[in-house]
Amino acid sequence: MRKTVLWNPVVAIAFIGLFLSVIMKSAHNMENNNMVWGQYAAMKGAGFGVEQLNLKVMTYNIRHGRGMDNKVNLDRIAEDIRKSMADIVALQEVDRFNFRSGFRDQAKLLADRLDMHWCFATSMRWGFMQYGNAILSRFPIEHSEVYTLPGMKERRTLLKAVVRIGDRRVNVYTTHLGVGLQERELQLPIIADILAEDEGPSIFMGDLNMESSHVLVSSLLSDWYKLGLTAKTGTVLSGLEIDHIFVNPMPYQASAWTMSSVASDHNPVVAELLWSAQSRAMLAVAE
């Protein structure tokens, strides 16, 4: 005699709910995986390959080595950089052969002491004396370019260095924007156009004389990822955060912080970032 199986309504509802949740989770995972694999393909296209790229970088307005005691001492700047263990350093307010800093070539002197490659952009010149921005790198600098920016009180520059890390090239930029808003309104759009022309992994660092929340920054650098500080410490005495590190594309992992220093009127900003196409994709698939 055949037995009739009676369905318990509670069990039936629970079974249907479980079935639907499995389907929805599978669809969600598929969507996430497709998105991540799309990012993976884009990063490979940007020149990352399938290996990871881990870098520590710094931006530092050194005020030609004049510290909070009003004494010029480049040894303190060199020590800050050494302690940070940064691979690439962007410097602003750097002197070369200037009387106020002992006629020293500060860019070359720091590079020699730290055993790093270097390049320099002259923003201001008085005879043989120069003042501007510099980039130091533990990796070879293949070439550098200097872009002149308009300025009302003083001329500004954007310095670009193409750094070779193994078989990869990373574009590194640094600048020091004007104090006045009208100057920055002229300077930042020019920089944004230059940055937009580049391909591959890129880092933009410097003293922008305004916080990243300013509409000028957020609108023109919307495609760049700002490395936010782990603690809201500010980069100058006023507590404002006007020294920044931006990267493109967005890294897999990143953290940024300030180092307390009396070697300048700015604190250096240090960031560690990991670009990884393969690990991001594999992690998503595993999940």
Image (tube, grey):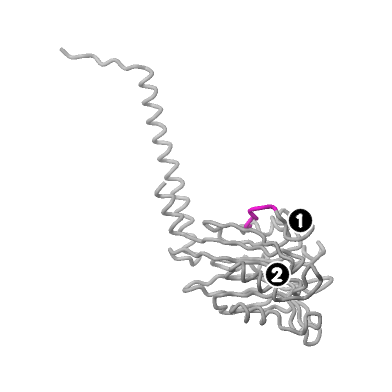
Residue 233: % across, % down = 71, 55
Task: Look at the image and give the residue range highlighted in magenta.
Answer: 226-232
Residue, far top: 1
By secondary structure, the bulk of the magenta-drawn segment is best described as loop
Determine crowd level at label 1: few under 14, some 14-19, many 20+ residues with C-alpha closer than 10 A.
few
Figure label count: 2
Reading the image, the residue beneath label 2 is 175
Q: Which residue occupies 37% across, 17% down? A: 9
Q: Which residue occupies 66% across, 53% down? A: 231
Secondary structure at badge 1 equals: loop
Residue 15: % across, % down = 36, 26
Residue, far right: 153
| Residue type (three-letter) at the residue carrying disc 1 | Gly
The image shows residue 91, relative to residue 283, as above or below, that is below
Reading the image, the residue beneath label 1 is 239
Secondary structure at badge 2 equals: strand
Residue 206: % across, % down = 69, 66
Residue, far left: 1
Residue 250 in sight: yes
| Residue type (three-letter) at the residue carrying disc 2 | Thr
Which quadrant of the figure has residue 121? bottom right
In front here: 238 or 29? 238
* Residue 261 located within the stretch drawn in magenta: no
In front here: 247 or 255? 255
